[in-house]
Image (cartoon, helix red, strand yellow):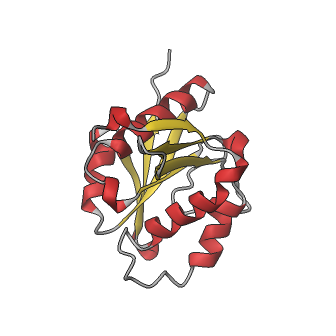
Amino acid sequence: MESSEFLIRPATESDRTFLARMFYLTDVLGDETRRVSETFLKDRRNYVDFWTPDQGGLVAFSPAGVPAGAVWLRAGDNNRPRYGFIDTDIPELAIAVEKRYSGRGLATRLIREILDASHQAGAPAVSLAVDEGNERARDLYLMLGFQVYEDRAALGTAAMIYRFPTS
């Protein structure tokens, strides 16, 4: 199955439970045998509970209609800093793909589509956090044009940024 075979649509309020699942997968790095982090509940509130559809997001489905992955944006908020937070005018991206759909280009497609939407909405950039040791994700982000903004070793992450070209 190629990434073009997935149906992608805007995330809605009714997708919140699936976004929570996707956030769980980001916390355990896709390994569902791992325990969640000590900060999982607080982080889930910041990334999922405080998300609203107007901040942006996409949900992908297999041709059979099975939820396959999601990408969503969190607006910058000084009161609720997150791992990839850079500034209030730069939304932060969160993404996960179900393991059974990994390696099919879906994450690349989701990121490209959310970057396009963010650029059209006037965002100057998009940020994200990548866990130390998640080289596969880091390599993907670098390939897509993200740059390391700041290593945040105390948090076990690095903040990365994708800057849109200025006219």
Q: Is residue 105 left or right of residue 94?
A: left
Quarter location, residue 62: top left
Q: Residue 26: image x %, image y %? A: 45, 65
Which residue: 25% across, 60% down?
135
Figure quadrant of the N terminus = top left
Q: Residue 66: image x %, image y %? A: 47, 51
Q: Is residue 131 left or right of residue 15?
A: left
Q: Is residue 3 left or right of residue 77?
A: left
Residue in front for this viewpoint, 51 or 151: 51
Quarter location, residue 79: bottom right
The image shows residue 112, relative to residue 103, as above or below, that is above
- Examine the rendering and report whether any part of residue 32 can be seen: yes
Q: Residue 31: image x %, image y %? A: 35, 74
Count of numbered badges drawn on the protein: 0
The image shows residue 18, relative to residue 163, as above or below, that is below
Q: Residue 68: image x %, image y %? A: 44, 51
Extreme residue toward the top, this view = 167
Residue in front for this viewpoint, 160 or 67: 67
Which residue: 50% across, 49% down?
70
Which residue: 57% across, 55% down?
85
Extreme residue toward the front, this view = 64
- Examine the rendering and report whether any part of residue 81 can be seen: no
